């Protein structure tokens, strides 16, 4: 199911996002993608930044905080920068969604924080250390929250714990939360 990551080293830096957007556009704009053949993955094309869907930016960049000095104050700002681990695996997102029942994918639901936050669906290609996260929009649609490449053992252990918690049904909030 998984080709190797895209080699972005051979693409001019000022053309990387246009190159990646062609993949995203082909996968999610030109063609409808469905989870379990019933839940539409809405690219939310009405939400754009720099002419590209916000979900595209969440699949290819990572929010990075930095500090700037303004007069006598230090202000913390956030900027989205290219994340090679995510971006080079962009072409995996659609196959992971469409093949969520494959034995290479661990599927689980997780509530991010306590309170009214929605429960999200995680599709973890665990042998590849790659995760796609979806959030339900309504009865028959959802959107791409993000995807990312796992680079730390601690994060891998966290996902294993979340998966086991869902599978054991030990968290009452996750009982009968399935979308299909």
Image (spheres, rainbow, N blue to C red):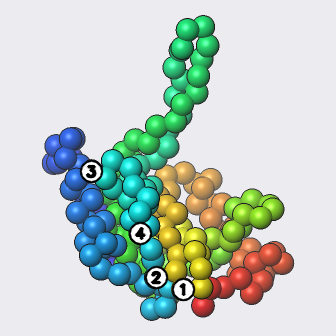
Q: Which mark is residue 113?
A: none
Give yes or no for contact between labels 3 and 4 (Cβ–Cβ under 8 Å): no
Give yes or no for contact between labels 4 and 1 (Cβ–Cβ under 8 Å): no
Q: Quadrant of residue 122?
A: bottom right
Disc 3 or 2, which lies upstream in sequence? 3
Q: Position of residue 85 (x, y in %)?
A: 39, 53
Nearer the observer: mark 1 or 3; the answer is 1
Q: Could you give the CA–CA distance between mark 3 and mark 2, rounded to whole angstroms?
A: 25 Å
- Which residue appears at 33% of the width and 47% of the height? 50
Q: Nearer the viewer, residue 51 or 103?
A: 51
Residue that label 3 marks: 17
Q: Which mark is residue 140?
A: 1
Estimate how packed mark 3 is, as few (under 14), some (14 to 19) or many (20 or more) residues with alpha carbons within 10 Å: some
SS label for mark 2:
strand
Give yes or no for contact between labels 2 and 4 (Cβ–Cβ under 8 Å): no
Q: Could you give the CA–CA distance between mark 2 and mark 4, rounded to whole angstroms?
A: 9 Å
SS label for mark 4:
loop
- Which residue appears at 44% of the width and 67% of the height? 44
Q: Position of residue 104 (x, y in %)?
A: 47, 80
Q: Which part of the image, by quadrant, shows the C terminus?
A: bottom right
Residue that label 4 marks: 43
């Amino acid at each position: 199911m998984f080709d190797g990551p895209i080699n972005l080293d051979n693409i001019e830096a000022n053309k990387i996002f246009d190159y990646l957007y062609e993949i995203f556009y082909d996968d999610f704009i030109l063609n409808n993608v469905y989870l379990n053949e019933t839940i539409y993955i809405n690219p939310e094309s009405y939400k754009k930044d720099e002419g590209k869907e916000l979900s595209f930016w969440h699949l290819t960049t990572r929010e990075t905080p930095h500090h700037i000095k303004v007069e006598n104050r230090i202000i913390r700002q956030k900027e989205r920068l290219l994340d090679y681990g995510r971006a080079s695996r962009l072409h995996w997102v659609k196959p992971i969604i469409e093949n969520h029942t494959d034995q290479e994918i661990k599927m689980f639901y997780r509530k991010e924080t306590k309170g009214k936050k929605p429960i999200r669906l995680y599709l973890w290609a665990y042998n590849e250390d790659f995760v796609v996260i979806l959030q339900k929009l309504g009865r028959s649609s959802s959107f791409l929250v993000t995807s990312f490449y796992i680079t730390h053992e601690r994060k891998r252990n966290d996902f294993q714990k979340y998966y086991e918690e869902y599978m054991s049904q030990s968290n009452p909030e996750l009982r009968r939360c399935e979308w299909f």
